Amino acid sequence: MLAFDKVDVSMAGVHVLRQVSFRLPPGSTCALIGHNGAGKTTTVRTIMGFTESSGSIRLAGEEITGVAPHRRPGLGIGYAPEDRRLFSAFTVEENVLLPARVAHLSAEETARRLERCYAVMPELKELAPRPAGSVSGGQGKMVALGRALMLGTKLVILDEPFQGLAPVLAQRYAEALKRLRAQDRDITLLITESNPKLLAAFADITLTIERGEIEAGGH
């Protein structure tokens, strides 16, 4: 589903990603593990087109390196950044629906995808009418995941989703990911994390990145 081939990224003259290559088959769950500054966020931002890169990036066999950033979500990519980036004056449901409206999805398709989000995260439906600025940090992570699911039909990218979550909220988030996997076995998940133990029982592929390079021995 997703393939990197010798991808390089430099920022302000500093080599951030170095010849990064990996392949994620459809339906896989990949944990991208690394310390802060190792290159995890740069990798996911490169998938979204937010960096200047060389090499090849393919989604479902199609080269996307030349696709503009604002067009990549329309290819079936959902992205939940580490900082959530919610619109605090909008309701929770309005935040979730925003990508569908920007993508001009039909009312029927929008409703179908919203129900998919609520099936994965039932508590999100309870939060739907609340202003997004009033939810907790952990609940905000759920909103960001729901928003990513509105367009993520092929690939969903979650950047440090467990960071800062209390154990009970981390457990709820993990349960939501399991429901998503049970509901859609073809979707590919890419999850970045600093602590490999958090995803050890969930991911079927683990990639370790250090100093911008994928270490040998990933599986």
Image (tube, rainbow, N blue to C red):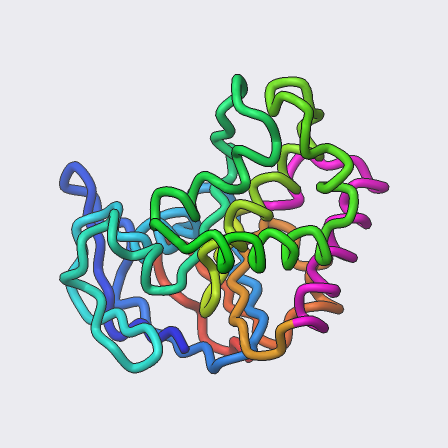
Residue 106 point in image, percent of width and height:
42, 55
Task: Report which quarter residue 214 is drawn in.
Answer: bottom left
Residue 55 point in image, percent of width and height:
18, 68
Q: Nearer the viewer, residue 5 or 170?
A: 170
Q: Is residue 155 left or right of residue 189?
A: left
Q: Is residue 146 above or below residue 202?
A: above
Task: Give the quarter of the figure containing the N terminus.
Answer: bottom left
Magenta-drawn stretch contains 105: no
So how many labels did they put on this image?
0
Q: Nearer the viewer, residue 53 or 175?
A: 175
Task: Report which quarter residue 113 is drawn in.
Answer: bottom right
Q: Nearer the viewer, residue 95 or 107?
A: 107
Q: Residue at x 77, y 36 (%)?
A: 126
Magenta-drawn stretch contains 177: yes
Q: Is residue 92 above or below residue 207?
A: above
The chief SS type of the magenta part is helix
Q: Nearer the viewer, residue 59 or 161?
A: 59
Residue 91 point in image, percent of width and height:
59, 26
Q: Residue at x 56, y 41 (%)?
A: 144
Q: Is residue 13 above or below residue 33?
A: above
Q: Is residue 183 left or right of residue 32?
A: right
Task: Give the quarter of the figure containing the C terminus.
Answer: bottom right
Q: Is residue 6 left or right of residue 172?
A: left
Q: Which residues are magenta?
A: 161-183
Residue 10 point in image, percent of width and height:
19, 48
Q: Residue at x 20, y 41 (%)?
A: 11
Q: Residue at x 47, y 30 (%)?
A: 85
